[in-house]
Image (tube, grey):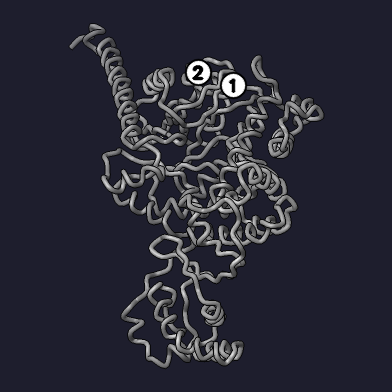
């Protein structure tokens, strides 16, 4: 997709403002929730500008409702684009979901039925959004707690079809894959292998809350080992891709969040090193010398 | 060959209503078969239980959001009554915009008419609702360029009296039956009594300065004079209008206070300019 690899970042959250604005800790980049800064002025805009003065920011939205049957909200899109001009975000992401319908907003990331109808509906709207924003548009796979009787394909087939038909990027949330795999009983590695790796523009990693019969994607706590393992495998398939740690509930001190980002950086480096070793070996076995070609 | 009937409108239309229902979906027999038309369930959760995870989140998220913005109302109603208040509000005024910031937009009107608020708390909660809405509005209202002191100094003295004043758009005037801005600060600092205070008619200038929403308590006449200025009446004329409304004794007292008020309003950044012809 040609998106830059920004390294490893974390979400910009209010409880960390003091630590960030007082000490300007090293961080490759921050992700902001677009809707938190689409207001008109005041403190949110001031804090945004302070962050922008030291860091690369990337916009991530929660309210676009790309899968809704309601018309796209032009006012929302205009304000999103205005903010993007201000932040110089390299891409804009939101979720492959619907958040409301018939004028009512549930403010939740509801899954779509995995059907051809939904693919066409979302892809057409994603193309319109991408054209309007004049920036790469990236869709994130959501975690889900229900499955539809209408679905006619797997989630990763659906994600792939939408991204291909819309010609947009994919924000691969590895924790969401794990959560949905647990809730719906599929192998998360099938998902990781099944998505279009060349379209992955960004990763999300987060913790969750396991209630036994189901998992809720709470973005609380550390990333669990199983999700780290999925992430390592995913990076081997996609190569270096910008990665972000999300932590939105029971938010810890900034140092703890930064340590989680360091852990992601180490996991990423490990996978990329393994990838280089495999590439080198492959190149050695297919080089003219190894094939016994004449000098 | 005919195309299959669209599924998306049916699914979204059904769920946007079902996920806002007050009762647990698995306990609503009339709904369970309709839910099963759309949702599969699994060996751990029934279709209704799967959908109910989203329904519970709807109320958790929105009641919490209302509590964050309206903790003054919540303080006087108490936790359980506020939960009932918020759920009734969401039923009457479902969220309609992408931002949770707008969630409470109708809360003053709702507070005024909802029968669940005890009579002795009605006026206090209504005042608080109005103040809390004003607070949300001012918090991220469009920025205003800083006052240009040089420009102000160059304005001829008589112009201050004879031309309409330009007041900051980040100023709101409010008259309450209870001193709700002061009460809300006390609630935030955990020093407010849980019992409602006695009524105390109060007048305020509520404004944003250095990115913080602030308030200043005003004399009733200062509040009225500011209202006249905001309506575009020049200072001298507004003072005359105000005097005619007051007893001669009070009018004389106010006359001695106006210069001090004006100075303080300028210090608080309320006065930006005079209108230039």
Pointer 1 indicates a residue of which chain? A
Q: Quadrant of the C terminus of chain A?
A: top left
Query: Which residue sits at x=31%, y=80%?
Result: B150
In the image, residue B91 above or below residue B220: above
Q: Position of residue B41 (x, y in %)?
A: 68, 20
**Looking at the rendering, which quadrant does residue A260 occupy?**
top left
User: Can residue A237 be spotted in the picture?
Assistant: no
In the image, residue A106 above or below residue B72: above
Residue, disc 1: A154
Q: At numbered mark 1, what does the secondary structure look like: helix, strand or loop?
A: loop
Quick check: B186 left or right of A16?
Answer: right
Quick check: A117 left or right of B165?
Answer: right
Residue, disc 2: A188
- Calculate the distance from the C-alpha at mark 1 to the C-alpha at mark 2: 12 Å
- From this viewpoint, which residue is outermost toward the right? B30
- From this viewpoint, which residue is outermost toward the top? A292
Q: Position of residue B184 (x, y in %)?
A: 52, 57
Q: Position of residue B206 (x, y in %)?
A: 50, 67
Q: Residues within 10 Å of mark 2 (few under 14, many from 20)?
A: many
């Amino acid at each position: 997709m040609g998106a830059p690899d920004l390294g490893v970042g974390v979400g910009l959250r209010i409880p960390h403002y003091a630590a960030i604005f007082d000490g300007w800790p090293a961080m490759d980049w921050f992700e902001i929730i677009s809707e938190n800064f689409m207001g008109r002025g005041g403190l949110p805009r001031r804090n945004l500008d302070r962050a922008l003065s030291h860091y690369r920011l990337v916009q991530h939205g929660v309210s676009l409702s790309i899968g809704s049957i309601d018309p796209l909200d032009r006012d929302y899109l205009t304000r999103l684009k205005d903010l993007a001009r201000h932040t110089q975000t390299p891409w804009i992401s939101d979720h492959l979901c619907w958040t409301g319908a018939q004028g009512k907003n549930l403010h939740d990331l509801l899954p779509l039925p995995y059907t051809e109808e939904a693919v066409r509906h979302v892809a057409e709207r994603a193309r319109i959004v991408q054209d309007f924003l004049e920036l790469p548009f990236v869709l994130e796979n959501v975690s889900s707690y229900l499955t539809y009787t209408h679905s006619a394909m797997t989630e990763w087939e659906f994600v792939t079809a939408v991204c291909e038909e819309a010609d947009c990027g994919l924000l691969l949330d590895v924790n969401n894959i794990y959560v949905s795999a647990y809730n719906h009983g599929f192998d998360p590695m099938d998902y990781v292998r099944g998505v279009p790796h060349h379209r992955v523009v960004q990763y999300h990693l987060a913790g969750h809350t396991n209630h036994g019969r189901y998992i809720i994607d709470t973005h609380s706590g550390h990333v669990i080992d199983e999700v780290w393992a999925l992430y390592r495998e995913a990076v081997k398939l996609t190569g270096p891709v910008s990665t972000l740690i999300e932590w939105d509930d029971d938010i810890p001190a900034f140092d703890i969040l930064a340590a989680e980002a360091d852990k992601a950086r180490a996991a990423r480096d490990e996978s990329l090193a393994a990838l280089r070793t495999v590439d080198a070996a492959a190149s050695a076995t297919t080089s003219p010398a190894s094939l016994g070609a004449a000098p | 060959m005919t195309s299959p009937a669209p599924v998306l409108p049916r699914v979204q239309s059904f769920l946007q209503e079902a996920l806002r229902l007050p009762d647990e979906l698995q306990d609503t027999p009339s709904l369970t078969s309709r839910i099963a038309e759309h949702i599969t369930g699994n060996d751990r959760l029934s279709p209704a239980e799967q959908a109910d995870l989203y329904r519970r989140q709807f109320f958790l998220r929105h009641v919490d959001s209302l509590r964050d913005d309206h903790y003054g109302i919540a303080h006087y109603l108490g936790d359980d009554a506020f939960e009932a208040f918020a759920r009734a509000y969401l039923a009457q005024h479902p969220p309609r915009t992408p931002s949770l910031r707008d969630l409470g937009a109708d809360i003053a009107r709702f507070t005024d008419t909802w029968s669940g608020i005890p009579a002795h708390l009605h006026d206090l909660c209504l005042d608080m609702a109005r103040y809390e809405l004003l607070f949300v509005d001012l918090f991220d209202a469009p920025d205003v360029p800083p006052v240009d002191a040089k420009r102000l100094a160059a304005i001829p003295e008589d112009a201050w009296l004879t031309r309409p004043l330009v007041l900051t758009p980040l100023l709101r005037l409010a008259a309450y039956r209870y001193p709700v801005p002061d009460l809300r600060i006390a609630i935030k600092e955990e020093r407010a009594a849980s019992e409602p205070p006695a009524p105390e008619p109060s007048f305020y200038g509520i404004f944003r300065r250095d990115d913080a929403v602030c308030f200043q308590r005003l004399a009733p006449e200062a509040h009225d004079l500011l209202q006249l200025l905001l309506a575009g009446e020049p200072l001298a004329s507004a003072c005359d209008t105000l005097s005619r409304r007051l007893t001669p004794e009070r009018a004389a007292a106010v006359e001695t206070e106006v210069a001090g008020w004006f100075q303080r309003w300028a210090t608080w950044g309320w006065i930006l300019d005079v209108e230039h012809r």
